[in-house]
Amino acid sequence: MPALPPVRALLETAVGAVGGAERPGQVEMAEAVGRAIRTGDHLAVQAGTGTGKSLAYLVPAIRHAVEKGTTVVVSTATIALQRQLVDRDLPRLAKALAKDLRRTPTFAILKGRRNYLCLHRLDAPEEPEDQGLFDPFAVSRLGREVTRLREWASDTETGDRDELVPGVSDQGWRQVSVSARECLGVSKCPIGSDCFAERARAEAGKADIVVTNHALLAIDALQGYQVLPEHDVVVVDEAHELVDRVTSVATGELSAASVGIAARRVGRLVEEGLADRLAEAGEGLGMLLEDVPAARMDAIPDPVRTTVAVIRDAAHACVTALGPEKKDDVETATARKLALSVLDEVHDTAERILESFDPPEPDRRDVVWVSRENDRPAVMRIAPLSVAGLLRERLFGETTTVLTSATLTLGGSFDALARQWGLPPEQRQGRQADGAATAKEAPHDKSDIRWSGLDVGSPFDHAKSGILYLAKHLPPPGRDGLPDAVLDELAELVEAAGGRTLGLFSSMRAAKHATQALRDRLGTDILCQGEDSTSLLVKKFAEDPATSLFGTLSLWQGVDVPGPSLSLVVIDRIPFPRPDDPLASARQRSVEAHGGNGFLTVAATHAALLLAQGAGRLLRSTSDRGVIAVLDPRISTARYGGFLRNSLPPFWTTTNPQVVRGALTRLASHG
């Protein structure tokens, strides 16, 4: 059989089919991805907005899958990108490349089992497990949602939650879905042949390209059971999110509610005293945690340790009492499976919490903390200090991996994120002149993993299209809200821009404070995150150039508004993690215990990544123009400021407020 056309030729065909133009960065990236797939070396590619990176990795991935008869997995962090790939990019590519590849490439989307409707569970949803739902209004809402889901079940072809519009609450969806642990399995489920999740897995198993999310990729790599089809290449898009998503999957929690659910599920299947013992221990934990501060636990109080040990032992006793799997009727088998899933989770989390306090602190691998969210009862959580070793062994050690994003180089280097991924630095480095980085961190094995980093640039001319304004004259941020001088500066900038402002704030409190203060002073509309759904607020902002939108974290990464509606991005302060953030503070301390600079390795890297993402909101098309205004003077004056500035696109930079206001006024007059 004649060889398939090279990547460059296929890319040319693909770009022509979608009506695009060849971009040097896209070509460079596509050829580098193809080379990495051939050699088996890992690759990190930074590709700015507008590069066309989706085509640049999809074309070589499809070619490899068709040529070798294998599957390539593409993992993304957001539903929006998954939908773009499956609904737009891949259908057009499959059609465009079919002739050259001598068959039409196939693709599928695959999510975790919990994202699909379970027809068996739908027949007998459980009573609400959340005590808050004993509120009659909540119970009534839940009943309406389950009724609607039953009606939808007869119409849907996929059972995919994302296709249910409008959606239902998480509590409602849990009534009609199961996790992988709770599933009976095709052979035992009376509706197994019609299972939506199994159908999706079967389709994925036959596809050339499988699109999934970082969470499912992490489950496949870390949990010890296969959920993705066999594959030899993984492309991780939005790779700057990978560590946080993997950490989330590896995080466990223990609370009175989770223990109570386990006790109720097993109560009808074992002798009453066993379940009661578990339930009482859970209630005891809940009472004890009310007196424990919501913070990282460097040591576990003896009463809490004893109670967690009782929970572990009681859960183990219930699992033992259930005994080995029997030939039960379907109803009993379902109840048994549901009970085992939560019992195992409670037991394993309790044991993990107890074991985490055994080694001396510098050698601990997990962080334990107590949290209280929205006035709900306290919860104990446990997460790994680092997922670098897990990723190194289970991802990079198993498959050729391509990581890509618009933001991967921080301080001008891939090394900061490489260390978080478990990859060795591209080259050894010591402290830079501006204090930007240090290669010392908690040690991990660096044996023979080969990778390279590539920055293919951006189609935007940042120096001619944007201004980076560093408000060096302002006071440093404090704890008492936004100073008057900052509010005055913000008002003058928004007024000069005629609205058209995206305000990115480090806290919702600051966003609300700025919104209220400027609404009283300006004649243009200001929207604030939380006043409506974020998607509707972004839509209103995009449709009216005279409007501004203020908000916090999700806006730093989730806004795509090309054109005249956005010409000013304001960042109120450097987005360091909160000093009381349990994971970040523990990671900083661990780095310092091993001789590194915890602040630079953890806090400054976190801030640099968010700053780069926030600055990326400004230029979304080649015709966009505007200003990034950072109102925190530390980016100019602090020793780490050089690292942060080097993490931003190469905008023309000034500290002169008159120059900036003049530029914004001219942009507004032409908008």
Image (spheres, grey):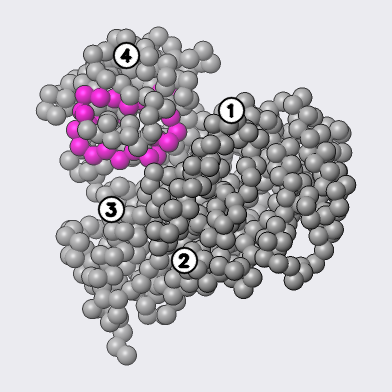
Say what amino acid the circle numbered 1 marks. Answer: Asn
Say which residue label 3 marks: 51
Residue visible at 24% across and 58% down in the picture: 24
Q: Earlier in the sequence, mark 2 or mark 3?
A: 3
> Could you tell me if the residues under marks 1 and 2 are in contact, i.e. CB atoms within 8 Å?
no
Residue visible at 32% across and 48% down in the picture: 48
Say what amino acid the circle numbered 2 marks. Answer: Ala
Say which residue label 1 marks: 374
Q: Secondary structure at mark 4?
A: helix
> Could you tell me if the residues under marks 2 and 3 are in contact, i.e. CB atoms within 8 Å?
no
Q: Earlier in the sequence, mark 3 or mark 4?
A: 3
Q: Is residue 63 above or below residue 434?
A: below
Q: Earlier in the sequence, mark 4 or mark 1?
A: 1
Say which residue label 4 marks: 519
Range drawn in magenta: 544-573
Rounded to the nearest angstrom, the CA distance separating label 3 from label 4 is 38 Å
Circle nearer the viewer, 2 or 3? 2
Say which residue label 2 marks: 200
Circle nearer the viewer, 3 or 4? 4
Rounded to the nearest angstrom, the CA distance separating label 2 from label 3 is 31 Å
Relative placement, left or right, of 625 versus 404 is left
Relative placement, left or right, of 564 versus 260 is left
Q: Nearer the viewer, residue 316 or 191?
A: 191
Rounded to the nearest angstrom, the CA distance separating label 4 from label 1 is 28 Å
Say what amino acid the circle numbered 4 marks. Answer: Arg
